[in-house]
Image (cartoon, rainbow, N blue to C red):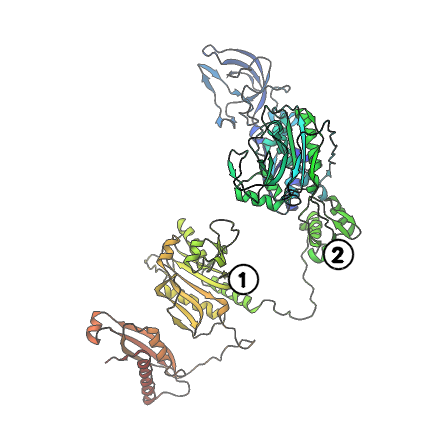
Amino acid sequence: MKFTLSWLKDHLETEASLDDILYALTDLGLEVEEVQDRAAKLKPFTLAKVLEATQHPDADRLRVCRVMTDEGEKQIVCGAPNARAGITVVLCKPGDYVPGIDVTLGIGKIRGVESHGMMASERELELSEEHDGIIELPSGEVGEKFTDWLAQNRPGAVDPMIYIKITPNRPDALGVRGLARDLAARGLGTLKPLKVEPVKGGFDSPITVTLAEDVRGNACPHFVGRYIRGVKNGPSPVWLQERLKAIGLRPISALVDITNLFTFDLNRPLHVFDADKVHGNITARQAREGETLLALDGKTYALGPGITVIAYDQAPEALGGVMGGEVSGVTEETVNVFVESAYFDPITTAATGRRLKIHSDARYRFERGIDPAFTRDGMELATKLILDLCGGEASMIVEAGAPALSDRAYRFDPKKVVSLVGMDIAEGDQRATLEALGFTLKGDMATPPSWRPDVLGEADLVEEVARIASLTKLEGKPLRRTKPGVPRPILTPIQMREKAARRTLAALGYNECVTYSFIDGATADLFGGGSEATRLENPISSEMTHMRPDLLPGLLQAAARNQARGFMDMALFEVGPVFSGGEPGQQALQATGLLVGATAPRDPYGSRRVADLYDAKADAEAVLAAIGAPQKVQISRKAEGWWHPGRSGVMGLGPNALATFGEVHPKVLKALDVKGPAVAFTLRVEAIPFPKTKTATRPALGRSDLQAVDRDFAFVVDKGVEALTLVNAAQGADKALIDSVAVFDQFTGEKAEAQMGAGKKSLAITVRLQPRDKTLTDEEIEAVSAKIVEKVAKATGGALRG
């Protein structure tokens, strides 16, 4: 929403400074995005007077002017047809930057005659599109700043332009008057009364309006129209053009400019038809299949059911609440017009705009909800301004339907401000605030004004009171304790587990990412998702069509963006929900880490190791330990398809998978444009079993003074036997005595097969025996060793290597 300071003061009687107004707007929830000092670019220019203008000796269209400036007489060569003696002009001196032509002036020669600057036109100073001649001012002294002259004579040309963000729940702030009302309620001035004086019609309108049954009471419940004959549709006055140009709109003609003015001034979109091009009467109805419309933007749109149109003679001529048609648009030759002021349903208007991909100021307002009670008053005000600027004679109003007013009233309880917001505001001040905003108070009931469709309950009344009072006055206070002592924990076990996972990952050196819960269908399909169960009905973009089935795609996309900017070494993590569907119970909590590139920066000795799956495995184990997973887990190779099949594993307790780690599949990295390899791990936080007792206790620390015994074993096994199978078998030979088992050698290849047979390999392990009560004897050690060989042989089919 854009407006100027002087425009605001048309509705607000105030002496507040610009800074005070800007602060108040943001504090009221209307965030100021930008302020343009439109006078800044005009500050260098001064007024001058032409003393003499003579013909250039070598050019028929140039004049050599003797100009009186604040620095004395100067010679300026000018090609404007109105350059003559006696006029007051705007002078641009050598060294000045002229915005309209994007040139910094210097002293130059034009056809052999020296020129010291230039006399500017309005287009050269970006005041308008006028370029038929230089600016002639009706007043002003030589040397006077041009900005000072404009501020006194044409304030709209140099007024500061303010651009504010409007949240979707505040349609009333899409008009300057709505902003003025908020500021007046805050105490920055007085809201000027808006006088609506009915314009007496001089004849019956030759065009009537009808609401079809398919829009009556819903898509278009109220339509007001008026015929005005004998208008003159020339350029709009300077004040109106400057007001529109200040907010980035191009003046077109008086009739069009008036509709644009009402859109931004009073949040009342209007449309004006050329009545001589309207054949028959006007009907608001739904479009029919196969109908088309050439709109004012020059595009032809295919229409259909669900779209509200304004039609005459059975042909659609405007899109209700969105855009008018080209055929019946007004031009300079327009003499008779039919003015439309109607109310269109927000949902229908939004659906039409999205379906046809049309963005217009009218749609922006109707889909948020304009004031339904202002439809007829808007017509009266628009009629008066059209008659003032364009002349003509107005008919009597034609009307169909009635305002779509809702009977809303909510209980007003002054104590709610304390209980909901924590602010202590006197009841009288609360009532005065609501009344200043247009609410009607009767006893303990408050009725919202018709222009506030967002107020839907008691809490909204509290919000309005607190917003106007300013939330900056809110003081932080500790909550009162109902019982003495240490309060009970408020976090659930899963929340505690999530917190521990996040802290552990950060401590391991990972950087936290927060990615969108939505991804595109193709990426979701790579990670086992992309089904109809997770597809969004109304995605915000084509890249966010599905709920994410895993956290890994978001981290990989973040890595790709970083790599595109030259950051090749990354450790990223995220803790958040993933989705297998849209129903309850189809959401799960994951903790995922991603390592790309080297594990440490390059050093003088070149020891720079690329992260591998064992780094991911170690970090996954550290996080599992931090969130209470059992120390002993089984590892299998049954990882999902987006993991490298030979370099990944799944940690679990029987069929219950707790975590997956390993390299990301190369095809996934290629699809997401990530330069690999990349290793990662994913923890299923909710799958980890909670302890059976509420109070978690650590096991007793077992220490032994006795010497540990290490024994090495080499087994000949089939090539397909996994080392983990062998290690687990050896570990189970005597769980009390065996402290650890580790693989320290693997002998494979042609030489190994030549010695041990085809399809065979050798795996060597070291087993540490830790006695607890007494020193082991040779017989006890041999007994354990024999049991280890037996267990390994049974589990793997291998034999002790000779």
Do callouts 1 and 2 mark residues in contact (Cβ within 8 Å)? no
Element assignment for label 1: loop
Mark 2: few/some/many CA within 10 Å (<14, 14-19, 20+): some
Q: Image quarter for residue 413?
A: bottom right
Task: Choose between 452 and 581: the one closer to the eye.
Answer: 581
Residue 568 image point, x, y percent: 38, 53
Residue 357 image point, x, y percent: 52, 42
Q: Residue at x 53, y 25 (%)?
A: 124
Task: Choose between 380 and 623: the one closer to the eye.
Answer: 380
Report whether residue 281 is seen: yes
Residue 145 image point, x, y percent: 60, 25
In this rendering, position of residue 96 left or right of residue 559: right
Which of the marked residues, 1 or 2, is nearer the chain's N terminus? 2
What amino acid type is highlighted by mark number 2? Answer: Lys
Q: Quadrant of the C terminus?
A: bottom left
In this rendering, position of residue 406 left or right of residue 570: right
Q: Image quarter for residue 712?
A: bottom left
Element assignment for label 2: loop
Foreground disc of the pair 1, 2: 1
Q: In the rendered image, which residue does mark 2 sit on?
A: 415
Report whether residue 167 is seen: no
Position of 594 relative to 59 (above/below): below
Determine which of the numbered discs, if any, sits on residue 583 in the image: 1
